[in-house]
Image (cartoon, rainbow, N blue to C red):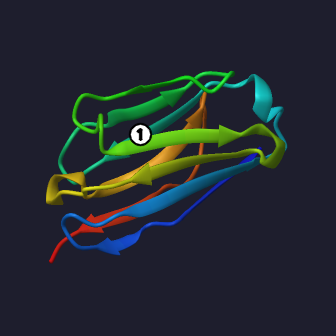
């Protein structure tokens, strides 16, 4: 099983960035997908969770700013992050019910 995350980088406050997570070696369709983030010195935070049919729950801290989706045909999950704030700076990673990608760093700074 491999989960390849991509799309992180440096973005200015108020900006946008999009992450993706592509899976291989797994029946992607049957898994609930979770996006987590972990900032330095802080606990891991669940950012968004996508059901098998694509309904999404968001953390209060990102609701209205982040949008997550999945494309089962492409075995890929997406996290669109808008109106970014410095406190969104963290390593973001996807998790398929215990299978976890390596994470990608998002830094929000001017």
> On screen, 50 above or below 11?
above
Instruction: Name, please, the residue furthest toward the front.
Output: 64
Residue 42 is situated, as x and y percent measured from the top left of the image, at: 19, 43
> On screen, 42 above or below 110?
above
Q: How crowded is mark 1: few (under 14 residues within 10 Å), some or many (20 or more)?
A: some
Residue 50 is situated, as x and y percent measured from the top left of the image, at: 55, 28
**Residue 47 shown left or right of residue 43 in the figure:** right
| Quadrant in the picture for residue 31 | top right
Front residue (pair 56, 22): 56
**Residue 6 shown left or right of residue 11 in the figure:** right
**Residue 42 shown left or right of residue 25 in the figure:** left
Front residue (pair 5, 63): 63
- Residue that carries the numbered disc 1 in the rendered image: 36
Q: Could you tell me which residue is drawn at 82 percent across and 37 percent down? A: 26
Residue 37 is situated, as x and y percent measured from the top left of the image, at: 36, 45
Q: How many labels were placed on the picture? A: 1
Q: In which quarter of the image is the N terminus?
A: top right
Front residue (pair 17, 42): 17
| Quadrant in the picture for residue 82 | bottom left
Q: In which quarter of the image is the C terminus?
A: bottom left
Q: Could you tell me which residue is drawn at 25 percent across and 51 percent down? A: 39
SS for dot 1: strand
Q: Could you tell me which residue is drawn at 62 percent across and 27 percent down? A: 54
Residue 43 is situated, as x and y percent measured from the top left of the image, at: 24, 37
């Amino acid at each position: 099983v491999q989960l390849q995350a991509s799309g992180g980088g440096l973005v200015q406050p108020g900006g946008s960035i999009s992450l993706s997570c592509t899976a291989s070696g797994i029946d992607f369709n049957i898994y609930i997908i979770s996006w987590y983030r972990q900032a330095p010195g802080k606990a891991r935070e669940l950012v968004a969770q996508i059901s098998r049919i694509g309904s999404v729950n968001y953390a209060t801290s990102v609701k209205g700013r982040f949008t997550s989706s999945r494309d089962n045909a492409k075995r890929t999950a997406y996290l669109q992050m808008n109106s970014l704030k410095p406190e969104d700076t963290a390593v973001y990673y996807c998790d398929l019910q215990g299978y976890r990608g390596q994470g990608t760093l998002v830094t929000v700074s001017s």
